[in-house]
Amino acid sequence: MGPVSIVVVGLHFGRTKVDDLASVGSVRLVGVCDLDQELARTTAAETGVRHYPDLPSVLADPGVTAVGLFTGPVGRADLVRQAIRAGKHVMTTKPFELDPYAARDVLVEAGRLGRVVRLNSPPAVVPADLARIEEWRASLGLGRPVGAQAAVWASYRETPDGSWYDDPALCPAAPVTRLGIYLVNDLVRLFGPAREVQVMEGRLRTGRPTPDNAHLTIGFAGGVVAGVFASFCVDDGRPYRDRLTLVYEHGSIVRTRGEAGTVTLELTRNGSPVETVTLAGPPDDGYQWAAFADAVRGGQPSDARVVAGVCVLEAMGRAARSRRVEAVLPVGEPA
């Protein structure tokens, strides 16, 4: 079978995906769409694809198999619903939504309709690093998880542009929502659904009205406590190379992202280093385009393991406003 035809919708961020798709053999870009018509026309001319004036025109085209939805997360579930009801599959980006009930309901509907809905975080296929972590825990008797500490940073000097990035209600604890969400989703995959959260945030130098320095504390069932620090204020020449320390009853694992997307795992057990491995990082910036195309061709259902992370973000938004510990809503994953 040939490549899956896709239209990228939302070019504020999706322009980078337009460039990436040029080297993806399993998915073929056939068009672009954005509310900014001039941006969409220019991008279409530069890439030699069709310019669609609006989402309805994309969904009405029988030659389009999938939609790459790269709009902001607020209200994205409704756009996904429009796409799947029009018979399209969807690839989108993190965070999936900020409303966990909306996220759950649209994924349930996607499953019922046989549509594939995927995103880069959490990915549908377990990455090699998380698979190795889970293997070590099971085979080496590390015991119960105790806690974790994660950090990611970059150097942004942004100015307000009227996007959802500027609204504290839509982008709470902004560095966590925009960068730390990868770490949040990894922690949820490793530890299960979260129970409660607390937020500390500040604004050091960005021109946006949203915070640029933030820490999220997450409490999981069984007493596991994890922290995620994310910042736009660190210019050390090592942006996005996040570090995650996982602590268990009888050992610890440190994951560090290095050069060229590699991931290094260091395992310590009973006080002594046991093993260090370096693995290839996720291809395609985590979007797993080939797996998405395989799922579309094979009629696989949408991936539902995204709701637990959305629940954390929703509770984080409440915690950022209240300055208190907030319970995470018990929204179950779709069956």
Image (tube, rainbow, N blue to C red):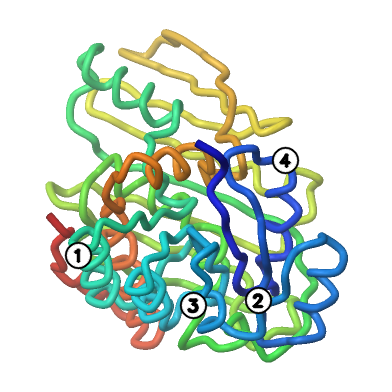
Q: Is residue 141 above or below residue 114?
A: above
Whole-percent x, y for residue 19 in the image: 76, 53
Residue type (three-letter) at the residue carrying disc 4: Ser
The residue under label 1 is 108
The residue type indicated by label 3 comes to: Ala
Residue shown at 41%/66% (left/top)?
96
Query: Can you give x and y, in whole percent of width and height, for residue 157 in the image?
Result: 80, 72
* Residue that mark 4 sits on: 23
The residue at which mark 3 appears reads as 60
User: Tag 2 or tag 3, which sits nearer the N-term?
Assistant: 2
Question: What is the quadrant of residue 146 in the picture?
Answer: top left
Residue 140, relative to residue 174: is it above or below? Answer: above
Query: Could you say which disc has been placed on residue 33 in the image?
Result: 2
Spatial CA span between label 2 and label 4: 20 Å
The amino acid on which the numbered mark 2 sits, given as a three-letter code, is Cys
Distance between mark 1 and mark 2 Cα atoms: 27 Å
Circles 3 and 1: CB atoms closer than 8 Å: no
